[in-house]
Amino acid sequence: MWEWLSDNWWAAWLVAAALLALTESLTLDFTLLMLAAGALAGAGVALLFPGMILVQVIVAVAVAFALLFLLRPTLLEKVRSAPGYRSALQRMVGSTGQATTAITGNSGEVKVNGEVWRARSFGDVEIEAGASVEVFEVDGITVVVYPKEP
């Protein structure tokens, strides 16, 4: 098998491209997709120049880097500016959690979705430790919360 693979590098490049593209479906960050396109370019060069492995690698790396730094930012901008897109922080709004310390208008901590966040209350409401809260907004690294039950 190794002998066949050494004569047919295009197959190894195609397998690498397919694995990277499939793995991209788990991250949805376009990084692995750009690397898969580079591997696909390496496969094309391997078909044209079967014995020139260094050229294949150089083309694969060049295409991957070009796509990573030229195309990926544009794609991410288009996706993030699409109607209905919400980041992970924006999806936190409306989530419920529990106050781990007393929360005032200036300070406090809350546990939301298993993560501890710095918190402050919406308005000047004081929230006791252990109370159930709902996230009103995310302000940098601080979540603004209000009591779930008045």
Image: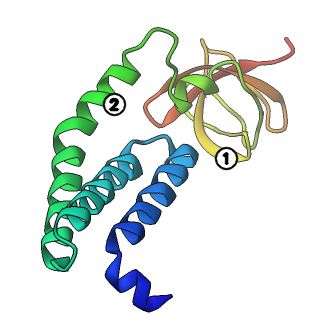
Question: CA–CA distance between discs 1 and 2?
Answer: 26 Å
Query: In x, y percent, where is residue 123?
Result: 60, 12
Q: Residue at x 84, y 38 (%)?
A: 130
Residue annotated with mark 2: 76
Residue 64 spot, x, y in % from top left? 23, 54
Query: Pointer 1: residues within 10 angstroms few (<14), some, or many (20+)?
Result: few
Q: Secondary structure at mark 2?
A: helix
Quadrant location of residue 71? top left
Residue 149 place in picture, x, y as percent: 87, 15
User: Residue visible at 61% across and 15% down?
Assistant: 122
Which one is closest to the eye, mark 1 or mark 2? 2
Q: Is residue 10 above or below residue 93?
A: below
* Left or right: 14 in relation to 43: right
**Left/right of residue 97 with respect to residue 124 in the rendered view:** right
User: Who comes first in sequence, dot 1 or dot 2?
Assistant: 2
What residue sits right under mark 1 in the picture? Answer: 115
Disc marking residue 7: none
Q: Residue furthest bottom?
A: 3
Instruction: Report the amino acid beneath label 2.
Output: Leu
